[in-house]
């Protein structure tokens, strides 16, 4: 590993159904709260499922008082809100050199499609001859990354990864590699998603994987996934630089692994998921027994939960059933798609920092095809030396991040 | 001429067989009610497409949980028949 930097997280930001900032988010996670609440009614029609994890109490105008908000759809706003919190916590002071070279890598898979939908609805149904002139810049998946760049004047590598539910795990992984190699001196990375709009909800309804009530990952009585919105960002920098400026590392990122199932658009493969986990552990120089906790992808679909359990056994062998703790915090903040990798990376970092395993809530009954220790229903104290965060996307694109405690 | 009594009206059966053949992209002669979707080489996404085609063709809503239970073409035909009958009943009642 000579020549490579150790990479630490020095700032975190999160805006989710469980809270408007990372502190409130963590309190809710540790308390096993659910962010899943009833959807509003939509004038365009009905939706078969009734609940989703929406952000409560978000005041757009308080965050964005000036005219520039007209340029930002909800997913870009969530990206910037989370980035501001992460940058503030990091205490980083921008200078010209840093601005010229810092990176921003975000993940998002739906961008501002809600904006497109409104414009097209008016055009098709009400005969309006034109759509919002900002439809294109509002709907780009990369809008959040651009807004963060503009806000801080950051001019280095800035881009967005779109790999469905793995998007922001891929984004953080690439940012981690750039900081580790010395290619960039600091990176803001994470993701955001605002999928709770009528057309998006109907598209998920048609997939027949959404629960009619709530999210019960790994529980035999699960009924599918729940959709959620959110934004989560982190600031990554080399350990020596962080310590030199007096920053307090929250946790260390040590490894990143990717793989593709190369098999099916919606049916995951245990081998593909296992290869990504092994790659992340190899990249981070971690052994099985060093991993105390895995933040599972855990969508609460039968396909994911069984395949992910099998993949964990492929990677960890007997230790998967005897010593390893996993949990799906999607049971609380639901599935935030392009933001999920970042939301769950924040969960994992905070779990390490607080020495607490966040639970899998709504867990009623062991599914024999899963059967691992999922930290059912209540958080548990445990010193976490190292942890993984799994993200497995439709289309078989897998991304796994490996973390270590910084002590 | 021999007349056979059938619970399932032939037209519904024929329409379902046509939709299955269309989704699977095979000749309709190769689709018979006793075949399972697995026999026909249909995976979860093919089944999803079939449910969409069937809902559109008959203007019915198929429940997610009930859809999961269906593994054979004949079960789809019976299920659709029940949904169509229920729809006709409720529209004649109003």
Image (tube, coloured by chain):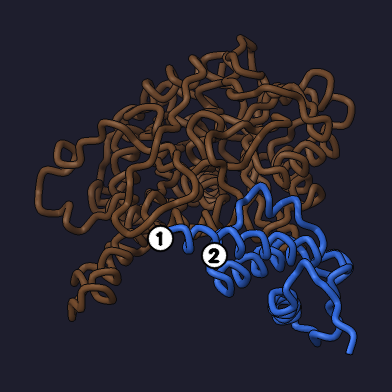
Chain colours: A brown, B blue
Q: Is residue A358 positioned above or below B17 on the image?
A: above
Quadrant where the C terminus of chain B is found in the figure: bottom left
Callout in the foreground (2, 1): 2
What residue sits 55% from the left and 71% below the top?
B56
Q: Looking at the image, can residue A98 be seen?
A: no
| Residue A274, numbered label | none
Q: Is residue A263 above or below residue A22?
A: below
Is any atom of residue A118 visible in this view?
Answer: yes
Foreground pick, A72 / A277:
A72
At a point 89% along the width and 90% down the height, the residue shown is B1
Task: Answer few, some or many: residues within 10 Å of disc 2's Cα (few below 14, many 20 plus, some between 14 and 19).
Answer: few
Query: For the point 38% across and 60% down, which residue is it?
Result: A142
Which residue was labeled with disc 2?
B88
Q: Which mark is residue A199?
A: 1
Q: Quadrant of residue A90?
A: top left
Across and down, in percent, residue A383 comes to 64, 12
Q: Position of residue A335 (x, y in %)?
A: 52, 42
The location of residue A18, given as percent across then percent down, is: 40, 28
Out of B37 and B84, give the one closest to the viewer.
Answer: B84
**Classed neighbour count for the residue bearing mark 1: other residues with Cα under 10 Å, few (<14), some (14–19), many (≥20):** some
Residue A370 lies left or right of residue A16; in this view the side is: right
Identity of the residue drawn at 85% across and 64% down = B36
How far is the residue under mark 2 from the one under mark 1?
29 Å
Q: Say if labels 2 and 1 share a chain.
A: no
Above or below — where is A379 with respect to A175? above
Measured from the top left, where is residue A146 in percent x and y? 31, 57
* Chain of the residue where label 2 is placed in the rendered structure: B
């Amino acid at each position: 590993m000579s020549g490579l930097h150790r990479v630490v997280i020095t700032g975190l930001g999160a805006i989710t159904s469980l809270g408007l900032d990372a502190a409130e988010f963590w309190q809710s996670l540790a308390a096993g709260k659910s962010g899943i609440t009833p959807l509003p009614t939509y004038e365009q029609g009905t939706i078969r499922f009734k609940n989703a994890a929406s952000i409560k109490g978000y005041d757009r105008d308080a965050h964005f008082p000036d005219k520039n908000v007209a340029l930002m759809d909800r997913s870009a706003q969530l990206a910037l809100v989370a980035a501001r919190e992460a940058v503030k916590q990091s205490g980083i002071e921008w200078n010209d050199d840093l601005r010229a070279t810092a990176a921003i890598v975000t993940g998002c898979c739906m961008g501002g499609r809600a904006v497109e939908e409104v414009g097209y609805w008016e055009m098709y149904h009400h005969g309006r001859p034109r759509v919002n002139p900002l439809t294109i810049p509002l709907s780009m998946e990369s809008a959040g990354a651009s807004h963060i760049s503009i806000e801080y004047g950051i001019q280095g590598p800035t881009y967005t990864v779109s790999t469905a539910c793995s998007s922001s795990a891929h984004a953080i992984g690439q940012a981690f590699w750039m900081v580790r190699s010395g290619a960039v001196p600091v990176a803001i990375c994470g993701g955001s998603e605002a999928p709770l709009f009528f057309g998006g909800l109907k598209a998920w309804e048609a997939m027949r994987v959404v629960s009619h009530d709530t999210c019960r990952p790994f529980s035999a009585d699960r009924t599918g996934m729940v959709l959620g919105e959110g934004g989560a960002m982190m600031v990554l920098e080399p350990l020596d630089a962080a310590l030199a400026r007096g920053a307090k590392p929250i946790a260390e990122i040590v490894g990143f692994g990717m793989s593709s199932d190369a098999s099916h658009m919606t049916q995951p493969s245990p081998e593909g998921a296992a290869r990504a986990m092994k790659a992340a552990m190899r990249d981070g120089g971690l052994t099985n027994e060093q991993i105390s906790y895995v933040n599972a992808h855990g969508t609460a679909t039968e396909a994911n939960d069984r395949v992910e359990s099998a993949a964990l056994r492929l990677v960890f062998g007997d230790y998967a059933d005897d010593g390893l703790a996993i949990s799906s915090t999607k049971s609380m903040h639901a599935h935030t798609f392009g933001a999920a990798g970042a939301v769950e990376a924040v969960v994992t970092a905070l779990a390490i920092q607080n020495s607490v395993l966040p639970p899998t809530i709504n867990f009623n009954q062991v599914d024999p095809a899963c059967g691992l220790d999922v930290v059912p229903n209540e958080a548990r104290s445990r010193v976490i030396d190292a942890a993984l965060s799994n993200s497995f996307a439709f289309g078989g694109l897998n991304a796994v991040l490996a973390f270590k405690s910084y002590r | 001429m021999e007349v056979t009594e059938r619970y399932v009206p032939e037209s519904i059966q024929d329409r379902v067989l046509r939709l299955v053949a269309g989704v699977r992209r095979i000749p309709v002669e190769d689709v018979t009610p006793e075949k399972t979707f697995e026999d026909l080489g249909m995976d979860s996404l093919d089944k999803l497409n079939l449910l969409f085609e069937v809902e559109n063709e008959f203007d019915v809503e198929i429940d997610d949980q009930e859809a999961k239970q269906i593994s054979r073409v004949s079960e789809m035909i019976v299920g659709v028949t029940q949904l169509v009958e229920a729809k006709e009943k409720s529209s004649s009642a109003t």
